[in-house]
Each structure stands twice: as C-alpha cells, then as structure tokens.
Image: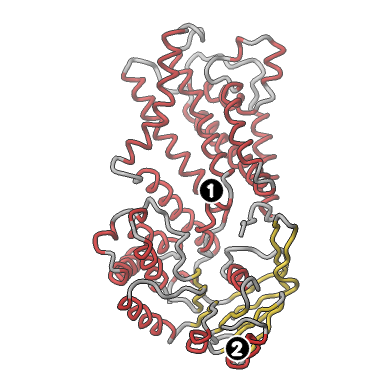
Amino acid sequence: MISVENVTKSYMTLGGRKVVFRNLSLDFPEGVSVGLIGRNGAGKSTLMRLLSSVDLPDSGKIVTSGRISWPVALKGGMERNLTGRDNVKFVCRIQGIRKSGMKEKVRFVQEFAELGGYFDRPVSSYSSGMRARLAFGTSMAFDFDYYLIDEVMAVGDARFKKKSRLVFRERLEDSKLILVSHNMKLIRNLCDAVVLIDKGRATYFNDVSEGVAAYRKTGEKP
Amino acid sequence: MHRSSTRSHFQIQRDVIYALLLRELSSTFGKSRGGLFWAMIEPIAHLLVPVFIFTFIRARLVPGVEYPVFLVYGFLPFLLFKSICLQMVKGVNAVKGLLAYRQVLLMDVFIAKAMAYAVIQTVVFIIVLTGLAMFGFDVLPPRPIELAAVLALTVMFALGLGLVLAAITSLVPDARPVVSIMFMPLYFISGILFPVTRFPDDWMRVLAINPVLHLVELTREMAVEGYEPFKYVSLAYPVTLAFTFTAIGLMLYRLRVLARVTP
C-alpha cells in the first residue's frame, strides 16, 4: 500500500517556479500493479522520484508500507571506482544483508549479469550494456513488494532480454510493480490498473483499457 | 523475507553509514593499481614541499620548536577541516545517485564522508610523522588525549560549517566556486606557515576572528612540546562556533534546504 497525501511539488527553473503537482492525493491499493501514463512532461517521472523518495515533496507526505525498490536498473548509484562485486556488496550492506545472505546475492548477480572477469574490475571499465546488466541484475537479486520501473526495461541483446523477462515474470508472482511507460502494450501486459497523469492531476483507472482510452484523448498517440 | 524489514531506524542508519564508509574508503584507495600509494602521495607532497623550503630558509622562525613539526601539526587540523567542508559544499547533486536507495539519507552520506576523510587524513599524518621521526625529530605529542579532542572538535566544526555552506550553495549554486576559493586565503591567515605571534598586537586581534586559527594553535599546543600558542587563543570560541554552526546546519537540514535536487 502506497498513499500519496496532499502532495505539492514544484521546481525552480530560470523562468520561475514550475508547479508539477498541487495538493495531489492518490492511493495505490495493495496487491495491484499500476502503470503510470501521461504525456511527456506531465510529471510521471517526478511522481516516480517522489515514490522512490529520491526527491522530497514541498509539502504533504507519502506513506508506504512494505518494501519498495529503488528505480530498477538505476545506474546513478554505482561507484565507478569500485568493482561490480563491491557495488553489489554495498547494496547488500545498506539492506542489512550480511555474510551468507550477501554471498548468495553476489552469486546471483554474478551469474545473471554475465560479466565474466569484469565482475571484479572497476565499473568505469564497463561498456554501457555491461553497466545496465549489472544494474538490472542487482535489482532482481532482492525481493520487494513493489518494483519501481521508469520506462526502459529492455537491456542487452535478444537472449539477455529473454532471460530478463523470465526472471522478472518470476518476481512478479510475489511482487507488484509501478511502471512508467509510453508503451501501451507493455502496460496492458504487466499492469492491473493505470494512473493517468494530466495537467497536475492524477486519475486512477481500475480498468487498463479505460485508462488507455482516456490517455489517447489527452492528445498523444501511444 | 529479509531481516531487513525488521531493522530499527538506528540499525538502518548504522548499516548505511558503515556501507558508505567502506565504499568511500575503498573507492579512494582502490582507484587504480597502487591506489593507496597515490591517495597518500598527494597530501604528503603537499606537506613536504613547504617543509623543505621553510626548514632551510628560516629554520629559526619558531623559537624552541622544530619547524617541520610545527608545520605538520598546523596542516593536520587545516586539511582535516578543508577536506570535510569541501566535500559537503559539493552538495546533494554530487551524491544524488546514492539517495535513490531509500535507506540512504543525505545526512548519512555527510557523516560517512566526514569519517572517511578523518581516517584518510589520520593515516596520511601518521605516515608523515613517522617519516619525520626517522630523521630524528621529536614528533610524539605530549598530550595525546587532548590532541584527539581538539581534532574531534575540528571534525565537528567542519561538519557544522559544511552543513551551513551546503545549504547556502544549494540555494545559490553560483556561490559554490566562491566558497572553494575562500579556502586559499584562509590557508594564509590560519597561521600554518609561520606563527601569528610575529604580527603586531592589533593584527593578532583581527586574525583571532578566524576560528580555524584557534583550532590550528590548539592542535600545536597539545602536540608540540614547549609550543607557546598566540596569546588570544581560546578553546571556548571554536567550541561555541562549532555548536552554533551545527545547530544552524541541522535546522537547515531539517527544513530540507539542502535536499533540493536539481531535476
């Protein structure tokens, strides 16, 4: 369960203050995978950052229960001077996972990301594909009640994509996700409900097709 | 499924600071092959150049005290102060990626950075002091406990001021280079290269406004046998300022002034 209570969020820009949300209230019910849809610049990513607590609201609050992931395939949290292994260990440590638990997670990522010897070399020597694989693998190593995913999910070549999809499906048996995407096919495939964000307002649709139809009316073709 | 969901706030913070500290230290020391060597050589070179120059030119600058020892114990608190402060001025955008992990708070990052730099500087200075000792200088501090206390005060002062500066620079990003440049003149008015007792009395009163000078002089008083600090030296002054800055800094942090992430 995630509830957004009376949240206002604005950013300072050179052209003055730009308000993204004013007094936004929204509930994400338990056990439902939700797609966030809306036009470019509507505030989907801002909402995502608020949900993942990367960014804080100006006022109001976001109440969460259960374990919520960091934005999946996040690469910004990686330290370039450290090896892939050490980066995974760091994530384990902040989650409070030590010793045998940590070993198991590290092994999972090592096998999943297929980095070979590069797993023990600094991340700065990785190609962008390798970095993405490491980040995705790290996200998949942990169990969450909610996975937060912003747009890009597919990384690597066709074979790796297939493998990712399989692992992700497996995770979704116990976990739910909140997905930002312009890809309506993906939304239909993975989500049970959608939230349409338009002009600073968020509308919850229990029915995905209804939400997608309303989104089309906002003027942008998917 | 994990024990992680049942951790208390304190346990989470402890885990996070520990993880950040390890990360900070291993990324500093593991930068390249011989990372430890390069991490050490820069500050050591920083110390050795003035030590050599000034030792040979004006060996009798500080009566009764060996000049290299005087110099090294001046650099110790100053570099500690500077490195911690500058890390925090870089502000929230430098560590934005880390904050995506919801357990990690900005304050944890600051605390871990301060601890990491305290460890790094301490190791560097132990190496330099060992080197001086091998050349026959008397480097053992006569009052080690008091010395540790003054250095701890320096770290706290740096953290407090760093928080305030981080808030200012996140409100006015243009102030960032100005703050960084400020450390250059500060170096010269903090009595590191030569003792301020050489100045006329009126000048000393003005120089005494600078709290870093007090920290430098206090460090020497505790660390160098027979050193006479300048006559306006005060422990109460930097202590008061450290608490004031920390209080203001924490208040600004609470008001989320520094938490502004540029999108």
Residue at (29, 60) in percent of width and height? A119
Q: Residue A8's spot in the image, x, y percent?
A: 72, 68
| Image quarter of the C terminus of chain A | bottom right
What label does residue A2 carry, if any?
Answer: none
Front residue of B149/A67: it is A67
Callout 1 amino acid: Ile
Q: How is the image coloured?
A: secondary structure
Residue at (70, 57) in percent of width and height? A13
Callout 2: SS = helix
Number of numbered discs on residues: 2
Callout 2 amino acid: Val
- A43 to B42, vertically: above or below: below
Front residue of B93/B257: it is B93
| Marks 2 and 1, how far apart at CA | 46 Å
| Image quarter of the N terminus of chain A | bottom right
Pick out the residue farthest to the left: A117
Q: Residue B121's spot in the image, x, y percent?
A: 44, 35
Q: Are marks 2 and 1 in contact (CB under 8 Å)?
A: no
Q: Residue B108's spot in the image, x, y percent?
A: 54, 53
Residue at (34, 60) in percent of width and height? A127
Q: Quadrant of residue A115?
A: bottom left
Mark 2 burial class by Cα count in 10 Å: few <14, some 14-19, many 20+: many
Callout 1: SS = helix
Say which residue label 2 marks: A212
Question: Which chain contains the residue that carries disc 2?
Answer: A
Say which residue label 1 marks: B111
Are marks 2 and 1 in one subunit? no
Residue at (46, 65) in percent of width and height? A74
Q: Residue B197's spot in the image, x, y percent?
A: 61, 12
Question: Which chain contains the residue that carries disc 1?
Answer: B
